[in-house]
Amino acid sequence: MEMLEIASIGFLVVFLGTLFLIGEILVKVKGLFGLLGIGIMTIYFSYHLTGETGLWVVLLYILGLLLFIVDGKVVNDGTIASLGAILMVLGLAIPAPNVIYGILASMGFLVGGFSSLLFLKVFPARNMWSKMTLKNKLSSEEGYNSINETYVQLIGRKGVTVSPFRPTGTVKIDDELYSATSGSQWLSEGEEIEVVSVDGTRIVVRRVEQDNKE
């Protein structure tokens, strides 16, 4: 236990405790990481708590951890998690015996927190911050495509504008109406156009008469 007087050992303890606690929040490991994290952090706090600091720093740390979990489960924007992280850092740094030790403990928390993201590559992830990340791959096999296949088939087809283009408007192709853009051209209603390209759901058209003049 006396080894905890060394700042580098404090860094290592906080790093491991944070690594497993945040890892427990991020991945499904049946509570194993949580038990390891709690055990390691208990060693840290039990050694550094004195009559001057008291139990309130532990409560500060726990409150920060709870805010971290609430953000991941409910809020999903990272603001409350950021506040929670600050409270956890304060809970770790305040009982430190000196400034250098406190800085290293804070760094141990940050490095451990970011390192816990590596667990996502090995273990199944929990449903945390799901609104901030796209978990499902949007593939054509699953019915997703950045380019609408129906629109792709319009390339080279001719139609007529049914509204003025300044430079967007509506065209009619084979009795179907589509929103389109003419780029830098301004078109009038009733002009013959041709679809020249498709970018996602954006249809680009141009006046047919220009081609004839060329």
Image (cartoon, grey):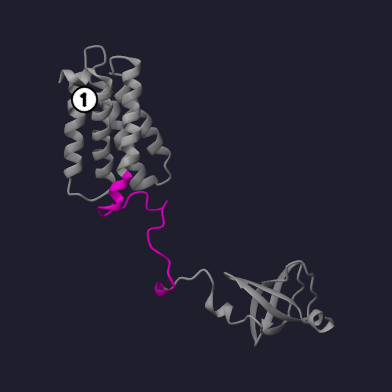
Which element carries disc 1, helix, strand or loop? helix
Amino acid type shown at disc 1: Tyr
The N terminus lies in quadrant: top left
x and y percentages locating residue 187 in the rendered image: 79, 73
Label 1 environment density (alpha carbons within 10 Å; few <14, some 14–19, many ≥20): many
User: As displayed, is residue 101 above or below residue 87?
Assistant: above
Q: Which residues are magenta?
A: 117-142
Q: Is 138 colored magenta in this rendering?
A: yes
Q: Which residue occupies the foreground of this view, 126 or 206? A: 206
- Which of the 4 quarters of the picture holds residue 207? bottom right
Q: Is 90 colored magenta in this rendering?
A: no
x and y percentages locating residue 179 in the rendered image: 65, 73
Q: Residue furthest top?
A: 52
- Which of the 4 quarters of the picture holds residue 189? bottom right
Q: Residue under label 1, please give it.
A: 44
x and y percentages locating residue 169 in the rendered image: 71, 71
State left or right for residue 95 relative to residue 151: left
Q: Residue furthest bottom?
A: 174
